[in-house]
Image (cartoon, helix red, strand yellow):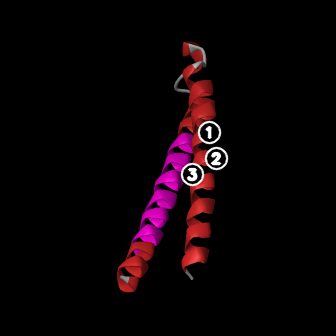
Amino acid sequence: LYDRLQTLNGHLEDMKGEIEDVKDEEQDKLDNMPESLHGGERCEAMQTAIDALDNAFNSLETAFDSIQDALDEIDNAKA
């Protein structure tokens, strides 16, 4: 169980990194859009995507923390 939980947390860390990379790329594209396009549908869609990626990142971080808490409890039970 312990090893499986550690593996899951490793996967979550990888996923968080990927999401952060995609979010940063999208944010850079949005930041570099000409001012004349700001406020348009495309910019709004990009911002919505960035917000959704941020929410996904936060959800994975919460899952990681919960699994880490479980690992800590297993460690405490062994002591």
Q: Residue at x 59, y 36 (%)?
A: 46
Confirm whether the magenta stretch covers residue 55.
Answer: yes
Number of the label disc, if any, that sits on residue 16 = 3
Q: Label 2's element?
A: helix
Residue 12: x and y, percent? 58, 60
Query: Separation of disc 2 and disc 3 at Cα?
Result: 5 Å
Dot 3, crowdedness within 10 Å: few (<14), some or many (≥20)? many
12 vs 25: above or below: below
Dot 1, crowdedness within 10 Å: few (<14), some or many (≥20)? few
Mark 2 sits on what residue? 18
Dot 2, crowdedness within 10 Å: few (<14), some or many (≥20)? few
Q: Label 3's element?
A: helix
Most foreground residue, 59 or 52: 59
- C-beta proximity under 8 Å, tags 2 and 1: yes
Going by the numbered disc 2, the residue's amino acid type is Glu
- C-beta proximity under 8 Å, tags 2 and 3: yes
Q: Quadrant of residue 36?
A: top right
Q: Label 1's element?
A: helix
Write the start and end of the magenta stretch as one range: 48-69
Residue 22: x and y, percent? 64, 40
63 vs 16: above or below: below
Number of the label disc, if any, that sits on residue 21 = 1
Most foreground residue, 12 or 28: 12
Residue 44: x and y, percent? 55, 35
Q: Quadrant of residue 29?
A: top right
Most foreground residue, 8 or 48: 8
What type of secondary structure mainly makes up the magenta span? helix
Query: Separation of disc 2 and disc 1 at Cα?
Result: 5 Å
Q: Residue at x 56, y 31 (%)?
A: 27
